[in-house]
Image (cartoon, rainbow, N blue to C red):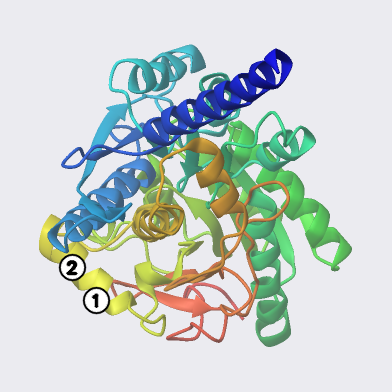
Amino acid sequence: MRSKVFFTALGLLVIILGVISWSLSVEAASIKPGKPIVLGLPCSFKATPWPLGAKYGWELAVEEINAAGGVKVGGEMHQLKLIVLDTRDEEPGVPVSESLLGIEKLILDEKVDVLVGGPTMSEASMAAIDLVAKYDIVHLITSGTWTPGWPKKVGGNIKKYRNSFKMSLNAVTAVQSGMELLGKIREKLALSKAFCIIDDVLFCRNAMDAFAGMAEKKGFTILGREAVPHGSTDFSPALMKAKRSGADLLFFWTNLATTTVFFKQFIDLEVPALPIGFAAGAQEHEVYKVVGGKVEYITFPNPHANITSLKAPGALQFQQAFENKFGRKPFGGSGNAYVGAYLLKDVIERTGSLETSALVAALEKCDYASMNGRIRFDGNHESIYSLYDPKEGVVPVWSQWQGGRRVAIWPPALADAEIKLPPWMKK
């Protein structure tokens, strides 16, 4: 009899402890009524246009979401609170450790619920992967980090790095998209000889290696490569080498804030090549006035449709809302950041929780229709991109400066104009 009573009591104790444990876990994962959901945005927004655009994109989306009532969690509506921290990772000479200290401050001092946006510099975001794992917090990158090393590291130990997700483009995918465009250019304009100029940093070196390898396999000739020191303000030596090489394509990839100098010197030197590649300043609509119009014919990836394309659903409304708030047209990482905020809202509302494991599981199963294309994550937690079809993935868009406007010229499904050659090219 005593034995029966003992085991009955023991069973009740196990049940009670289980209920208490469940209650504590639910309390930890839930959010108190009226408490905001805190998002931490680490980005080097004072250094280059790309992270500044990302900051603006997140701010606009958060403002819109809050104005519409906020985010619904467990039957309660919660406002979003965005805390922006300047990590300075894109400033020349600033060590990665400073960026990591900033991220740690967001986690420990600001008690953020989710890390979003950046850092944008590949070296900093690669290092942040381990920090995110250490503190067991979800990190959704929307801007920068184009290095193929990110998905390789995360996918190489997905159990350890399960909290890290990346919506931004990969340099290899960007180059693949560019190669598709170049294939069309060669077919229509008979251009096939390239000279490469890059900023001497990790993701730019990755891009050059990918471009040169793919281009040569497709029959293009690489006539030369030039890596410009990070922080440089004079591109003329490299541009003169390109001009003397006989190249009809100028491939550039730079993250320098001084790329406006590159644009002006390209025009002034009348380098007889179509300039195509990535430059931090090319996406800014205001750069046209800054350089006195000397940015014509520069061809670059946005890389997201809602920044320049008029065909992407909802893009025009986003462009108008952005200009109304900030007094300038969308640029840099703004388009993906804006979409990322709405994606995160959807994920939190579907899980009804801020618990890390629940958010990770929801992001892994994500299938979200956005104005930039369908958003899903692959096994490495990197967003799936499609070179042509927005119904299959996010589509990288290439634009060109024409008549003082950034015009989408690739791919055909999202293009608003045909590509143009500089008039001094003898073709």
According to the picture, the residue beneath numbered tag 1 turns out to be 317
Q: Is residue 179 above or below residue 43?
A: below
Q: Which quadrant of the figure contains the C terminus?
A: bottom right
Q: Marks 1 and 2: CB-CB under 8 Å?
A: yes
Disc 1 secondary structure class? helix
Q: Residue at 76%, 32% (x, y): give it.
A: 157
Residue type (three-letter) at the residue carrying disc 2: Ala
Give percent across and percent down for residue 361. Answer: 59, 49
Residue type (three-letter) at the residue carrying disc 1: Gln
Q: Is residue 241 above or below residue 136?
A: below
Q: Residue at 82%, 53% (x, y): give it.
A: 213
Give percent across and percent down for residue 260. Answer: 35, 47
C-alpha separation, residue under disc 1 versus residue under disc 2:
6 Å
Q: Which quadrant of the figure contains the N terminus?
A: top right
Which residue is at the front of the view, 206 or 188? Answer: 206
Disc 2 secondary structure class? helix
